[in-house]
Every structure is written in structure tokens, then in C-alpha cells.
Image: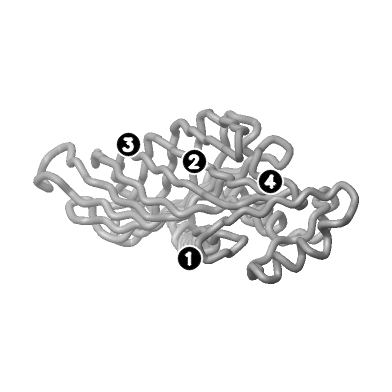
């Protein structure tokens, strides 16, 4: 039953993200969507509007190349998040169905192994927000997550790919634009399916796709898609085998629109995580 509920959560999670990403009826957004324009185009835009009542013009040299939008890693992160999520779900479902069918008809054992890991990841987003012609500001979001991650895998070759992951930890999120600052701290829980390739005695490569929530009500969405390497640091015959964990992935972090300072920031960011774990 827990596996079924987990599937339902993941599909709702993905569906909500797609809906929020491609919604077309945005009544609360009154400004035109941003786009990359040249310095000449910007100068012409200012020239056309500077004489209008109430307009204040302040030109800011945003970058050395005079681009008015600074690119970040959000596009690559959203693509990575989608690809890993699709791979994990499509590959994980047949193994889960096979396991449930075998469990109801035979006594074949799952033979679980467990891994407990402490890991930390941090990332930063920098963009430029504007509110008309009189308010250009550099916006920065710094976030870090530190948590205790619990993984389950199988020693049975038939189910060795099938795994589950969960992580409990704390997050610190700091938004800054010009002289305004806001913090979003809290405790988070992530859980979801995992694909494991390898055995605990050797290096394990895994794909995780987790979603969850935060105790901070202003954090509306949390999710993670990651590619992980677990490298053994001791003899395989030891009872407790320490591992070095290296992860690269995409983090989904969304602050409610009426609470955050960064109104138009993309919720996706890439990250690199380090940690230490123990095979139990």
C-alpha cells in the first residue's frame, strides 16, 4: 500500500509542476514576459517611454556584454530533473509490479540492505528582476540542505535495481534583492523511488527521484532528481561499511509567489553534493 501511495504522490507532484510551468492564465502577472534584448533595443525602448508621465529612467550596466538577462543553470536543471524522473519512474514501475506479484504468490525474499548517509548540498541563483523602468535589481537566492538519507536496496539479483530513498533534514534559504532580504528556514522530508546498479561491496551507481515537503509553509514545493556514486572506504567483509557519497542533480525549490522576494525566479537549480554513509 505504501508503494502505491508513493506512486500517487509522484504523479501528483509531476502533474502539479507541469501545470504550474505551462499555465497560460496568469491574472496576477501584469508585466510582459522578459526576453533577451540588445543595448540598442533597450536604448530605443527608453527613448520611446522617457517622456511619459510618471516614468523614471535609470540605466544599469547589468553585464559586460550589455545583456539585460543573465543566464543561469535553471534550464539545464529542469531538463535533468525531467529526464531522471521519467527514467526512474518508467524503469521502477515494472520491478515494483514484479515484486508485488512475486510476494503474493511465492516466498522469494527481497533480501534488503540498508544505507544511512549524511549529506549536504548548496546552490545559488542570480538573476535580474525589474518592476517597470524605475526598479532594476540584482536578485540572489542562496540555499543549503543538510539531511540524513536512508536508502533501501536488494541483495536478490531479481530485484537488485529496485530501491527506495528518504531524507530528513533542515534547509536554509536566503533571498536578497537590493536592500531587501528574507529567510525561509525549516525541516524537510523527501522520499521516492531509486534505481540501484551494483552491490554494496563495490561502487554503487544510483538514480534517485524524490519529492516532499517542508515545515515552512512558505516553501510550496520540494523535489530532487540526482545521479549518485557510493564509493566503499573499507573492506567488504566489515559489518558496517563506510561509503563516500558523491551526487550531482537538480533541485526543485519553490517559494509561494506572495511570500518570496524573487517573483520570477525559476524553481530549478543544479547542485553538487558530498556526504558519508554506512552500509548496514
Q: Are marks 2 and 3 in contact (CB under 8 Å)?
A: no
Neighbor class of circle 3 (other Cα within 10 Å; few <14, some 14-19, many 20+) is: some
Q: Which mark is residue 142?
A: 2
Q: Which residue is mark 1?
A: 87
Between the C-alphas of marks 2 and 1, the distance is 29 Å
Between the C-alphas of marks 1 and 3, the distance is 25 Å
Q: Residue placed farthest to the right in the image? A: 53
As displayed, is residue 121 above or below residue 68? above
Q: Earlier in the sequence, mark 4 or mark 3?
A: 3
The quadrant in which the C terminus is found is top left
Between the C-alphas of marks 4 and 2, the distance is 15 Å
Between the C-alphas of marks 2 and 3, the distance is 21 Å
Q: Which residue is mark 3?
A: 118
Name the residue located 47 percent from the left edge and 46 percent from the top edge: 124
- Percent x, y for residue 73? 49, 59
Between the C-alphas of marks 4 and 3, the distance is 32 Å
Q: Which residue is mark 4?
A: 263
- Percent x, y for residue 57? 75, 52
- Percent x, y for residue 65? 52, 66
Circle 4 or circle 1, nearest the eye: 4
Q: Quadrant of residue 38?
A: bottom right
Q: Are marks 2 and 1 in contact (CB under 8 Å)?
A: no
Q: Secondary structure at mark 4?
A: loop
Amino acid at each position: 500500500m505504501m508503494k502505491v501511495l508513493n506512486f500517487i504522490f509522484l504523479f501528483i507532484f509531476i502533474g502539479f509542476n507541469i501545470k504550474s510551468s505551462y499555465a497560460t492564465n496568469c491574472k496576477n502577472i501584469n508585466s510582459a514576459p522578459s526576453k533577451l534584448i540588445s543595448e540598442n533595443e533597450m536604448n530605443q525602448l527608453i527613448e520611446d517611454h522617457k517622456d511619459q508621465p510618471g516614468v523614471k529612467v535609470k540605466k544599469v550596466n547589468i553585464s559586460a556584454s550589455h545583456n539585460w538577462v543573465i543566464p543561469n543553470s535553471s534550464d539545464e536543471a529542469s531538463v535533468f530533473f525531467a529526464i531522471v524522473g521519467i527514467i526512474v519512474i518508467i524503469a521502477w514501475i515494472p520491478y515494483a509490479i514484479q515484486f508485488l506479484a512475486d510476494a503474493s504468490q511465492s516466498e522469494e525474499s527481497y533480501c534488503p540492505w540498508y544505507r544511512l548517509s549524511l549529506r549536504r548540498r548548496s546552490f545559488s541563483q542570480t538573476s535580474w528582476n525589474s518592476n517597470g523602468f524605475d526598479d532594476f535589481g540584482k536578485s540572489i537566492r542562496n540555499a543549503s540542505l543538510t539531511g540524513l538519507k536512508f536508502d533501501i536496496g536488494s541483495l536478490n539479483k531479481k530485484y537488485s535495481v529496485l530501491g527506495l530513498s528518504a531524507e530528513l533534514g533542515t534547509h536554509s534559504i536566503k533571498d536578497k534583492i537590493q536592500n531587501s532580504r528574507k529567510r525561509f528556514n525549516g525541516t524537510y522530508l523527501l522520499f521516492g523511488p531509486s534505481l540501484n546498479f551494483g552491490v554494496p561491496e563495490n561502487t554503487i551507481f544510483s538514480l534517485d527521484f524524490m519529492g516532499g515537503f517542508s515545515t515552512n509553509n512558505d516553501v510550496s514545493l520540494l523535489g530532487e532528481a540526482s545521479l549518485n556514486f557510493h564509493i566503499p572506504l573499507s573492506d567488504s567483509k566489515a559489518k558496517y561499511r563506510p561509503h563516500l557519497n558523491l551526487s550531482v542533480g537538480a533541485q526543485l525549490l519553490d517559494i509561494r509567489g506572495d511570500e518570496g522576494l524573487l517573483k520570477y525566479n525559476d524553481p530549478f537549480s543544479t547542485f553538487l553534493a558530498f556526504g558519508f554513509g554506512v552500509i548496514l
